[in-house]
Image (cartoon, rainbow, N blue to C red):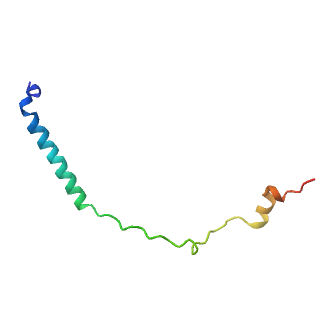
Amino acid sequence: MPQLDTSTWFTTILSTSFSIIHRLQLKLTTHIFSPNPTPKDLKTLKHHNPWDKKWTKSYLPLSLHQH
């Protein structure tokens, strides 16, 4: 059985690791990285509030009439 012959293990492991490292480097060098996102000013962002004020007032716990 050739798997038990340990004389070729070093060559096999070395060539396999070289192939994996080489392919990894090729993939990393051809990858196109996206540019860094630019931060937005928080004061210019407007929040859209879909609730109508007359409905939200009736559901607030502090606006309930207390006895």
Instruction: Give me the residue at 11% from left, 25% from top.
Output: 4
Where does residue 18 sit, x and y in percent of width and height? 14, 47
Q: In which quarter of the image is the N terminus?
A: top left
Which of 23/14 is in front?
14
In the rendered image, the residue lying farthest to the bottom is 44
Q: Residue at x 60, y 72 (%)?
A: 46
Farthest residue to the right: give it: 67
Side of 57 relative to 44 (left or right): right
Residue 62 percent coordinates (x, y): 82, 57
Q: Residue furthest left?
A: 7
Query: Quarter of the image holding residue 10?
Result: top left
The residue sitting at 57% across, 75% down in the picture is 44
In the image, 23 versus 40, the foreground residue is 40
Q: Position of residue 37 (x, y in %)?
A: 42, 68
Compared across the picture, whether 21 is left or right of 1 comes to right
Q: Give the residue displayed 79% in from the left and 57% down from the top.
A: 59
| 12 is higher (above) or lower (below) than 48 | above
Quadrant of the image occupied by residue 15: top left
Residue 28 falls left or right of residue 11: right
Q: Answer with the quarter of the image where residue 14 lies.
A: top left
| Image location of residue 43, percent across then percent down | 58, 74
